[in-house]
Image: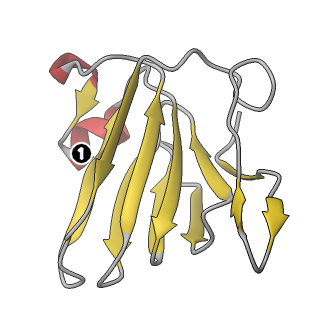
């Protein structure tokens, strides 16, 4: 499966606010085993710079704007910008990522696995060799 944007339903009204819902088996194709969020990331910092061997992720920008550059080991590249809290980015295993945050961005990640350092590929050349 390729990385792709998933639009979640916005329920509510502009004058009262919205809710969006993510549910396993309804609009998420993997079991969620970990949830984490990042915030207060300076906009001059590039995060990511790794890939995962088996981890699947669904990532949201619940505030601000987050830019993703993804690449598979064959050199196929994808660019995505998250700037609406009802749109998630699905990242399958095997994609190198670099991430840039706007000043006030908050990233929320729904992950298919608990943290496992052995699942990370942190060297770009090792990633290309996989």
Q: Nearer the viewer, residue 115 or 79?
A: 115
Q: Which class describes the residues within 10 Å of circle 1: few (<14), some (14-19), or many (20+)?
A: few
Q: Nearer the viewer, residue 123 or 103?
A: 103
**Residue 45, quarter of the rendered image:** bottom left
Instruction: Name the residue at 29% across, 84% down.
Output: 103
Query: Residue 34 appears at what percent x and percent y?
Result: 37, 24
Where the C terminus falls, by quadrant?
top left
- Name the colour scheme: secondary structure
Instruction: Name the residue at 57% across, 72% down.
Output: 81
The number of callouts visible is 1
Query: Residue 31 appears at what percent x and percent y?
Result: 57, 15
Query: Residue 87 appears at what percent x and percent y?
Result: 68, 59
Q: Nearer the viewer, residue 51 or 63?
A: 63
Instruction: Name the residue at 60% across, 62% down.
Output: 78
The image shows residue 74, relative to residue 130, as above or below, that is: below
Q: Nearer the viewer, residue 45 or 19?
A: 19
Query: Residue 20 appears at what percent x and percent y?
Result: 71, 50
Where the N terminus falls, by quadrant?
top right
The image shows residue 68, relative to residue 75, as above or below, that is: below
The image shows residue 121, relative to residue 48, as above or below, that is: above
Instruction: Name the residue at 45% across, 77% down.
Output: 64
Q: Which residue is mark 1?
A: 125
The image shows residue 111, relative to residue 38, as above or below, that is: above
Looking at the rendered structure, the secondary structure element under dot 1 is helix
Say whether residue 1 is left or right of residue 61: right
**Residue 2, quarter of the rendered image:** top right
């Amino acid at each position: 499966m390729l990385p792709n944007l998933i639009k979640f339903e916005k329920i509510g009204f502009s004058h009262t606010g919205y809710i969006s819902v993510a549910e396993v088996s309804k609009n998420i194709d993997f079991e969620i085993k970990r949830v984490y969020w990042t915030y207060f990331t300076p906009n001059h910092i590039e995060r990511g710079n790794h890939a995962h061997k088996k981890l699947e992720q669904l990532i949201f920008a619940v505030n601000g704007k987050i830019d993703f550059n993804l690449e598979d080991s064959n050199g196929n590249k994808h660019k995505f910008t998250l700037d609406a809290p009802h749109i998630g980015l699905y990242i399958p295993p095997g994609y190198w990522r670099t991430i840039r945050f706007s000043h006030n961005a908050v990233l929320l990640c729904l992950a298919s696995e608990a943290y496992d350092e052995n699942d990370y590929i942190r060297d770009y050349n090792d990633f290309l060799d996989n």
